[in-house]
Image (cartoon, grey):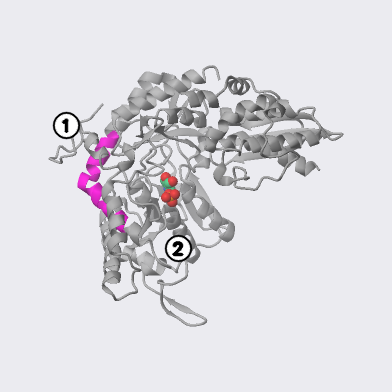
Amino acid sequence: MADLEELYREIILDHYRSPRNRGELPVPPAHRVEGFNPLCGDEVVVTLIVNDDTVSDIKIGGTGCSISQASASLMSSAVKGKPVDEVRGLIHTFKSMMSVHQSTLGDADEDGRQIEPGPEDPELVDSDALGELAALQGVVKFPVRIKCATLSWNALSQGLDELS
Amino acid sequence: MDMTDGAMTVDDVEVASGYLDVEKLRRDFPILAERVHDRRIVYLDSAATSLTPRPVIDAISKYYETTHANVHRGVYATAEEATRLYEEARIKVGRFIGATRPGEEVVFTKNATEALNLIASSWGHANLKENDVVVLTEMEHHSNIVPWIMLSEELGIELRYVPIDGSGRLDLSNFDEFCDGAKLVCVSAMSNVLGTINPITEMSKVAHDHGALVVVDGAQSVPHLPVDIQELGADFLAFSGHKMMGPTGIGVLWANATILEAMPPFLGGGGMILDVKPEKFLPADPPDRFEAGTPPIAEAVGLAAAVDYLQSIGMGQIRSHERSLTAFALESIGEKLGDDCRIFGPPAGDDRGGVMSFSYRDVHAHDIAQVLDQYGVCVRPGHHCAKPLMRKLGVAATARASIALYNSEDDINVLIEGLVEAGRLFANA
Ligand SMILES: Cc1ncc(COP(=O)(O)O)c(C=O)c1O
């Protein structure tokens, strides 16, 4: 079951069992975005506060599988307290990581949408920048799970767009 | 467990236990010879789509190799032969469900969903107006909900949902009141989530007493139970070819001839007209009226072969096999996994088909399905296109194992083995 262990790395199971930044921030001042995965009924609720171009607080609500929950938890830890520009860069790097092995889709995301060229070369997924998030790399081997992993990221990205 | 209720015929695919001879039948399904993750395929997703037996694949290939031509048009020999095959398929499918006038009453569609949309769009527009009541149930598939919601948004009709009880059956205690003033009752003969087999015959009687017509969603029942529309008392029956060992791309709408005769066309185009002038057209008689454009010809040929295949085994025998295997599955899961595994739907019995939705501890259905995949087990995680039902059950998703004539006790044992591994992997999750 080598593949399974690659998918369900210890960090992922840890974030699934004890999700970070769990809950919802009061709206206002927070901004609220919902994401749905119609395939499996997963729902994510991202509430975030942006102050001085920085994601000063973020919380994650909703229900979902281990991959969507762990990815949301890892995301919240990675972006909390980071400047919006850096967060956008991270979103891009993460989404590129989630698409690198989908050769048939080329430079497209899991919905077949073109990924906008980001601040860095999309060919070079810098796993240093990703830190713990690199643990989710195993997901690309399981194409149907990519949507689970990107659910919260798409919601965050939408939230930032709505705020800017 | 009662395994003696299968009719003990001389049928050579039936073995003494009431089970079919699965080893023999499995050889008819080429996909089952494939391997995934170096294991044999344990296919438990027949409620989503069934596997295709060799005779169906061969019938389709043979059609393309020897007979392919458009129907109802050419006068040359091949075109006539294609038309004959297509119309023969209609008759065969109609007889399979007990239609008395199959040549007029069977409409080929793209799938069950399109058949249900055809009813809502054509019959609905001609017969429903503001405040008219359409009765649905809480266990319907989105295909038998969304077309009615669309119609209610457009026409202002009222939708009433018959609730389910704690056992996953319809709560019919107030059904009489639900039907009061109703024009139409739409119900699935077998739930694609709970496996519940609904008492359609009794429901039709009540509906008819109130002057309502009855739409039966037979997507899950026609492939797995003997179905006779006269006995059901249905006015409409919709089902899909691909869930009954036929090809994708073809579905069936059966409706009583008098009702079809009075219905306006659904889609417009070639094949559905008698005459066309620049400003108006004269629609053809049913079933052509509802089959605009080139129909699924090869698919109809394949579906006819699927009906032959099912009938060669016998729907009674198939039901008996699946009933025994469902009882075995429910019992062994209960025995080996205990309260960790919650199975939705009624206990094994006459009103329980081979669809089993379950949750395992609090492991998400998606994760269960992922672990099972490593064992070659194909199950479906998700809401199964029945979100209102999921909300009622209080779950976002379930994992669903569904059986067919090619499944055996071995398959269930591998399923359980995989579930135990999922439990280990996600322990304390
Ligand atoms: C009960 C029920 N109704 C309708 C459908 C729709 O079938 P199809 O997708 O083939 O149109 C399905 C299958 O998914 C079903 O299980």
> What's the residue type where badge 2 is placed?
Trp
- Give the magenta-colored segment's residue range: B301-323
Name the residue beneath numbered marker 2. B123
Asked if the stretch drawn in magenta spans residue B313, the answer is yes
Amino acid at the residue labelled 1: Ala
> A110 above or below A55?
below
Choose between B71 and B347: the one closer to the eye.
Answer: B71
Image coordinates for residue A84, horizontal then vertical, percent: 80, 35
Q: Which secondary structure dominates the residues rendered in magenta?
A: helix
Q: Mark 1 or mark 2: which is in front? A: 1
On the picture, is B389 further left or further right than A62? left
In the rendered image, residue A69, in percent from the top left (x then y), is placed at: 61, 28
Q: Which percent across, then down, holds residue A111?
A: 60, 45
The residue nearer to you, when weighing B355 against B79, is B79
Quadrant in which residue A140 is drawn: top right
Quickly name the residue at label 1: B16
- Give the structural element (helix, strand or loop) at label 1: loop
